[in-house]
Amino acid sequence: QVQLIESGGGLVQAGGSLRLSCVASGRTFGLYVMGWFRQAPGKEREFVAAISKSGSSTSYADSVKGRFTISRDNANTLYLQMNRLKPEDTAVYYCAADRSNPLNRVVADYDYWGQGTQVTVSL
């Protein structure tokens, strides 16, 4: 079991950057695949990025590839560095943890979710 708390969202203009953080509770952080997802108003929650338990492997949605970077430290924190932000990146961003499955981008496979942090990108 793990509890997740996101932070770092905000309002930025197109082309700007934000860094999201997700702090996970417990001493078993390294046993979980971690992911970032986002959900815009009226749309389904969608995959953004994921990282393996060791941090050695990553996966990105095509829409953010080359602009976003997912990482994790050796303690309990997951990060999402977002550069060259676009208005279409506007959404609530959620971090999630998955202990039972390999690195993947399926929403239903993740076991634990944070409350989300709002990212708004203006024109």
Image (cartoon, rainbow, N blue to C red):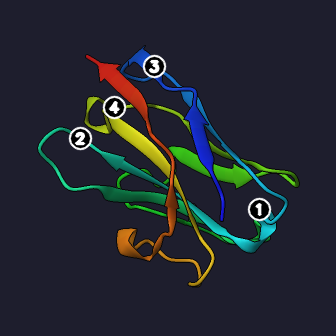
Compared with 13, 36 (above or below) is: below
- The answer to whether residue 5 is left or right of residue 107 is right
Residue where numbered disc 2 is placed? 40
Residue where numbered disc 3 is placed? 10
Badge 3 element: strand
Residue 112: where, in percent of width, then height?
52, 61
Mark 2 or mark 4, earlier in chain = 2
Of labels 1 and 2, the one closer to you: 1
Q: Which residue lies at the image location 34% right of the left edge and 23% below the top edge?
A: 120
Amino acid carrying label 1: it is Phe
Residue 24: where, in percent of width, then height?
70, 49
Do labels 2 and 4 touch, CB within 8 Å? no
Snapshot quadrant of residue 7 = top right
Q: Which mark is residue 86?
A: 4
- The answer to whether residue 38 is left or right of residue 36 is left
Q: Which mark is residue 29?
A: 1
Relative to the observer, which residue lies in front, 8 or 12?
8
Of labels 2 and 4, the one closer to you: 2
Image quadrant holding the N terminus, namely bottom right
